[in-house]
Amino acid sequence: VSFMDEHGAELHQLFLESAQELVQNLNDEALQLETRHDAQERQEALRDIRRIVHTLKGDSAACGLAEFSGFAHEVESKLEAQPANPAQMVMEAADRFTAMLRELRQNGFVEAAAPKSGAAQALTSAVPALRVDAARIDTLMDLTGELLVAKLGLQQAIGEFSSRFPRDPLRATLADVFAQHTRILAELQHAVLQVRMVEVARLFRRMPRVLRDVAQQTGKQITLEMRGTETKLDRSVLDALAEPLMHLVRNAADHGIEPPEVRRQLGKPEGGAITLAATQQANQVVISITDDGGGIDPARLRARAVERGMLSADEAAQLTDQQTYALIFEPGFSTAEQISAISGRGVGMDVVKSVVERLSGSVQVESSAGVGTIFRLQVPLTLAILRALLFKVADCTYAIPVSAVMEIVRLSSDDVVLEHGVEWVRVRDVVQRLVRIAASDAPRCYGIAVAIGTTQFVLAIDQPLAEENLVIKGVSDPLIASETVSGAAILGDGRVVMVLNLLAVFERAARTPVPAGGNLSAEARA
Amino acid sequence: MTMDGTNQMIGFAVGGKSFAVPMPAVREIVRVAPLTPVPDAPRHVEGVMNLRGRVLPVVNMHGLLALGSGKPAAGHAERIVVVEAGGRRVGLHVDGNAEVLKLGPQPMSQSTAEVRYEGRVIVVLDVERLLQELEAAA
């Protein structure tokens, strides 16, 4: 890679980042233009729009993106001609810019001519705050993680020295230096994590435009309230949540909120309300999407599940309302009549669930007929560090998030009942499903009672080990990627440990019946 | 191919037979570190190991090439040949005897992947294809 190539790639990255923000500003201003009636405010919005489009034109031209800058020029000319509905025109332009940016991100800048010399200075929108490639921050994170592992080795060596030379005055010095080292390392780790954190506002601000489009297509009136926008979240988590959140907001507007005439008949205000809220709870962030619409009718969901052959009538009748709501996340549950031009495209509810679960998070829904629906997405603050419980099964060490662990219990074969290919175990008078990762030979076994969202089960293990803060690495190589693994980490002794995706483990077990006789080891059964 | 027309390869033994991979595909050769098995991994993916902070998938070459007991002959000579292909790094678990082979300019015939070297027959492995086949088996 030549210097020019690398330089060019960096410039392109810079352009993509700043252009995306400019397009977002364009959407914001267009919405202002559409909703404000004060002539002066409208003038200000229009002035800002012209400035943004001009900047986009200049920046893209500096990067040699002829098509992009050509389109920006077109938009400028149209604005000069004072169109009848400038807000609509600008939003359509913003959509086109977004599509072009997406294409550039996916296909790279192959079509683009080489950037002009001095192009970086020409990027007029380059903000004074430093923009850094996310991969560089990940490298810092990895190195910090390796330092933490190396620290354990140092600790061991100091311990050995101290026991070998119990009277050596150097012991105290070593202990002091080590304590200092530990403190600085903790600060470093915290500081690196902070660099990755961004405000939820970055994601939420895309939603007014999403909602406006649905409102316009359906003739509904919807107000959007946003709370806790200053809540911070790891950028990779936030980026992954963009599609699911957009889907849920569209869905709430399209299916949740009733048409104005229906609302009037029900004695509700004609305009519906959707609230987006983010709060931090310990190491997790909860994002909720609340609407004051008609709610989800559990009876209709049960009927549909039976209709689709997903459940028998008996099974459906036995579901609690909470279990019934969970059906909407099943693949293929939404019906053709439900798929409209708005909600039918893009991701479905099953994708919402799988994206959130891949982040080791959970999604829950609560609904009340006539009052509305709340979707709650719970995700970890960061994917980089995980407080994990380590345990052993069949001589292998695995890790799971401590946040999912309710308690650890001793299991004996008397507690386990096999029924229709499913093992059940009683923990504190509650019968729960027993899930195994591997057949085990351990004479005694333990169970970890886990809860992720509304899913609860007991994971059979041989031996619980320690709790540790793990620096998580993604597992992306197709040779080792698996739905049951959410990541990997390196332990203090240098070994790799796999972090399990508990929900995927549960679902896997749910699909695989246990053979008669169970698979507890002989000794455990004895 | 180097400038003088010689063709350098890294040779190694698996189950008593000789194999080689082209030098440019090889990143390094390391001792076997403790391996961690991976749930649902394709057959012949033995597990992962820590390569200076990286998580490296390791392939059991005995199993893959259907040689010997299907397990590497445990011994001091065992090595992991770290190869790079298609932008990813994978470790090949081999019996050892890793050596640099300097092949003359003539020997590689296009039809077979076998070359003669100092009186031995050596099978040259196409790393990229090897990984593709492994994945397909997943």
Image: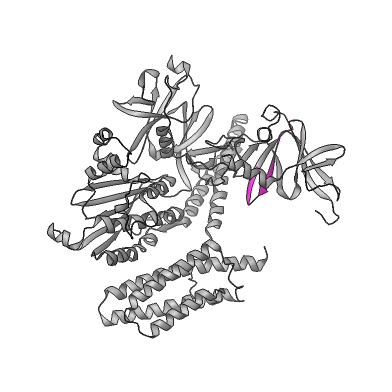
Colour pattern: one colour
Relative to A196, residue A113 above or below: below
Place of residue A355 in the rendered image (x, y in percent of width and height, measured from the top left): 42, 49
- The number of numbered badges drawn on the structure is 0
Toward the bottom, the furthest residue is A81
**Left or right: A99 as drawn, with respect to A301:** right
Q: Where is residue A308 shown, x and y percent of the image?
A: 32, 42
Residue A300, compared with residue B44, is above or below; it is below
Instruction: Please state, as top left, top right, bottom left or bottom right, where the C terminus of chain A lies in the image.
Output: top left
Q: Quadrant of residue A258?
A: bottom left
Is A6 situated left or right of B17 in this image? left
Residue depicted at x 19% and y 52%: A371
Q: Which residues are magenta?
A: B73-90
Q: Is residue B83 magenta?
A: yes
- Of residues A58 and B34, the one nearer the viewer is A58
Which quadrant is the N terminus of chain A positioned in? bottom right
Q: Position of residue A284 (x, y in %)?
A: 38, 47
Q: Nearer the viewer, residue A336 or A278?
A: A336
Residue drawn 64% across the image and 38% down it:
B59
Horizontal side of A222 relative to A310 (left or right) equals left
Find out whether residue A121 is within the magenta segment: no
* Residue B68 in the figure: left or right of residue A333: right
User: Is residue A123 in sight in this rendering?
Assistant: no
Q: Position of residue A163 (x, y in %)?
A: 59, 30
- Judge whether A251 appears above or below B42 on screen: below
Question: Looking at the image, can residue A110 be seen?
Answer: yes
